[in-house]
Amino acid sequence: MKTNEEKAHELYAYTCQIVSQLMYCSSKLREEDFAKVTDEMINLVSVYEDRIKIIKKGD
């Protein structure tokens, strides 16, 4: 089982990743189909939420 420190590190790394992906999506909002990009952003947030639940649960 992972320690809280290991879980925190994993969540920190994953948070950095999701923020980067959301920023990239935000940069595409003016150039691409708004609905498509916002759907992609919603999906990213949903996946992030699921991942947090997995990390919190402890594998």
Image: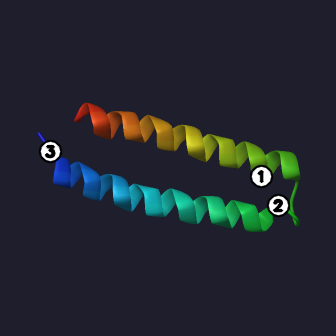
Image coords of residue 48 (percent x, y): 49, 44
Residue 32 in which image quadrant: bottom right
Amino acid type assigned to the residue bearing label 2 in the image: Leu
Residue at image position (75%, 68%) is: 27
Earlier in the chain: of badge 3 and badge 2, it is 3
According to the picture, the residue beneath numbered tag 1 turns out to be: 37
Please rate how many residues cluster around mark 1, counting C-alpha atoms within 10 Å: few if below 14, some from 14 to 19, many from 20.
many
The amino acid on which the numbered mark 3 sits, given as a three-letter code, is: Lys
| Left or right placement of residue 47 versus residue 38 in this view | left
| Other residues around mark 2 within 10 Å, as few (<14) / some (14–19) / many (≥20) | some
Residue 31 x %, y %? 88, 66
Cα–Cα gap, marks 1 and 2: 6 Å
Near-viewer residue (10 or 36): 10
Q: Earlier in the sequence, mark 1 or mark 2?
A: 2
Q: As drawn, is 21 to the left or to the right of 40?
A: left
Q: Position of residue 22 (x, y in %)?
A: 63, 58
| Residue drawn at x 82%, y 61% as measured from the top left | 29
Q: Are marks 3 and 2 in contact (CB under 8 Å)?
A: no
Query: Is the residue under label 2 in contact with that under label 1 (CB below 8 Å)?
Result: yes
Amino acid type, residue under disc 1 in the picture: Val
Which residue is denoted by mark 2 in the rendering? Answer: 29
Quadrant of the image containing the N terminus: top left
Q: Secondary structure beneath disc 1? A: helix
Identify which residue is drawn at 18% across, 54% down: 5
Q: Nearer the viewer, mark 3 or mark 1?
A: 3
Element at label 3:
loop
Question: Helix, strand or loop at disc 2?
Answer: loop
What residue is shown with label 3? 2
